[in-house]
Structures are given as C-alpha cells and as structure tokens.
Image: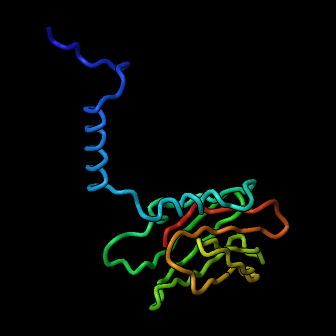
Amino acid sequence: MTPADPQPSDPIDETDLAILDGVRTLYSAVDPVPADLLTCIGFALSLENMDADSFRPDRAEDLVATRGADDGSRTITFHNDHLTVLVSVARQPDSTFTIDGWLTPPGTHSVQVRTTDGPTRTVADEQGRFVFTDIPAGVVQFVVRPVGAGGPIVTPAVVL
C-alpha cells in the first residue's frame, strides 16, 4: 500500500517545516530584509496629521537613493492641484545634506522636513525659497503648510 499524496488540508509536518526553513534560508541569502525597514515603516506611519493632503512626485525613481558612485545630489519635483515644490538635494563633505527648495505659487509658506531624528522647520521667503542644512542621510519627508489655505500637504518619503 502506498501513502496518499499530500493534500492541502493535511497538517504541516516535518517535511513541510524543512522546506519552509530552506525557503527562509534562500531568501535571507539572496534578498535579505533591509536593516532599516522597521524604521522606515514607523517613520511613514508616524505622520502627526493624518488629514494632510499629498504631493505627487513627477518621477517616482527620484524618491530612492541609488547605489554606486552617486554623490546623493539630485533635484525632485512634487506637485498637487494647488502647489508645486522643487527641492535640490546636495550631499556635503560631512555626509549630511543641504536642501534648497522653491514653492510655486511663491509665498511665506511654512515648510518642515521630517527625518528619523525629528522635524526641522522653516518659512519660505516671499519668492517661495527655503533652505535646510545639516540634514542626516536616511528617510525624509516634506510637509508644507500653505499660507491662508487648508491643512498641510505632505510628500512621499524620500531616501537621501
């Protein structure tokens, strides 16, 4: 008498556990979970005001840092129906970043950059320009509170 073929309703046995352990080992070797994944998830979920509107990036590939000889410098544009924000990101010799930004339409809008170290705030000048210095590498997000308008507008997370 030969044993019946395994059925989906059969309980998990030692063979199943060995196969699952092999799959876990394989993926741990070829595609490990990023060390900062939990930090990134917590960062994204910790937004203070969940009633915020959102910006859309012009190019989604600008949101993630690239590997290799990239110096970390790039320009990213976000927009929604009411406002556009352009940020120019430049890596400094001490591995922090300087972020120059411009808002259109211009105005003295409140701007915040959120990092895993906490938020930094400034106010754009009358031409819509703002600057952040000494921003650490990692995940950042921009929050703009337009003058005389509704609630805050938030960008997707960006990796510096």
Q: How many numbered badges does the structure rendering display?
A: 0
What x and y, as percent, mark residue 150? 82, 60
**Front residue of 34 and 143:** 34
Residue 35, how many percent across, how many down?
42, 64
Q: Quadrant of residue 64?
A: bottom left
Task: Determine whether 90 is above or below 50 in the image.
Answer: below
Instruction: Single out the residue that lies furthest toward the bottom.
Output: 93
- Residue lying at 51% horizontally and 84% vertically, measured from the top left: 96
Which of the two residues, 24 or 132, is positioned nearer the viewer here? Answer: 24
Q: Residue at x 77, y 68 (%)?
A: 146
Residue 106 location in percent, x, y? 73, 75
Write the residue at 15% across / 12% down. Answer: 2
24 vs 133, nearest the viewer: 24
Would residue 89 appear left or right of 113 to someone viewing this image? left
Which residue corresponds to the image point at 85% horizontal and 67% vertical from the top-left? Answer: 148
Spot the residue most to the top: 1
Q: How is the image coloured?
A: rainbow
Which quarter of the rendered picture does the N terminus lie within?
Answer: top left
Residue 107 in the image, given as x and y percentages of width and height: 76, 76
Closest to the observer, 49 or 54: 49
Query: Outermost residue, left direction?
Result: 1
> Dividing the picture into quarters, in which one does residue 131 lie?
bottom right
Instruction: Kindly indicate the quadrant of the structure image that contains residue 4.
Output: top left
